[in-house]
Image (tube, rainbow, N blue to C red):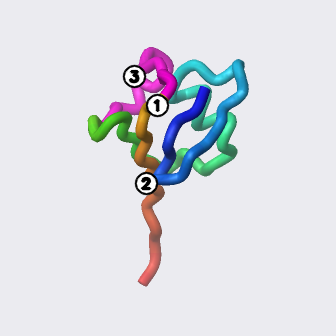
Amino acid sequence: MEISVNNKKEILPSSVHTVSDYVSHSGLPTKAMAVAVNNKVIPRIKWDLTKLEDGDNLTVINAAFGG
């Protein structure tokens, strides 16, 4: 499956089906992360239920702390 993540194309392995799968696969820290699929923010409690499809556009935002 090919998706766009923060405007960069990514080809995902066949084991990635949901937002939760993608987050696990990416290895990104999830503590202060927000994910939108096709410009719709997905609440963390729905990451397991939100299926990804070929051509989806993900926006992944990690909060930065400090000053």
**Nearer the observer, 36 or 64:** 36
For the point 37% across and 35% down, which residue is it? 37
Asked if residue 32 can be seen in this view, the reply is no
> Would you call the spot at circle 3 few (<14 residues within 10 Å), some (14-19), or many (20 or more)?
few
Task: Mark 1 or mark 3: name the one nearer the start of the chain.
Answer: 3
Asked if residue 61 can be seen in this view, the reply is yes
Give the SS element for disc 3: helix
Marks 3,2: beta carbons within 8 A: no
Q: CA distance from mark 3 to mark 2?
A: 17 Å
Give the SS element for disc 2: strand
For the point 41% across and 39% down, which residue is it? 57
Q: Extreme bottom residue here? A: 67
The residue identified by callout 3 is 46
Q: What's drawn in magenta, residue-wise?
A: 41-54
Q: Is residue 51 above or below residue 6?
A: above
> Would you call the spot at circle 1 few (<14 residues within 10 Å), some (14-19), or many (20 or more)?
few
The residue identified by callout 1 is 55
**Nearer the observer, 41 or 5:** 5
Question: What kind of residue is marked 1?
Answer: Gly
Magenta span has 52?
Answer: yes
For the point 61% across and 42% down, which residue is it? 10
Q: Is residue 41 above or below residue 48?
A: below
Q: Position of residue 43 (x, y in %)?
A: 34, 32
**Nearer the observer, 39 or 2:** 2
The residue identified by callout 2 is 61
- Quarter holding the C terminus is bottom left
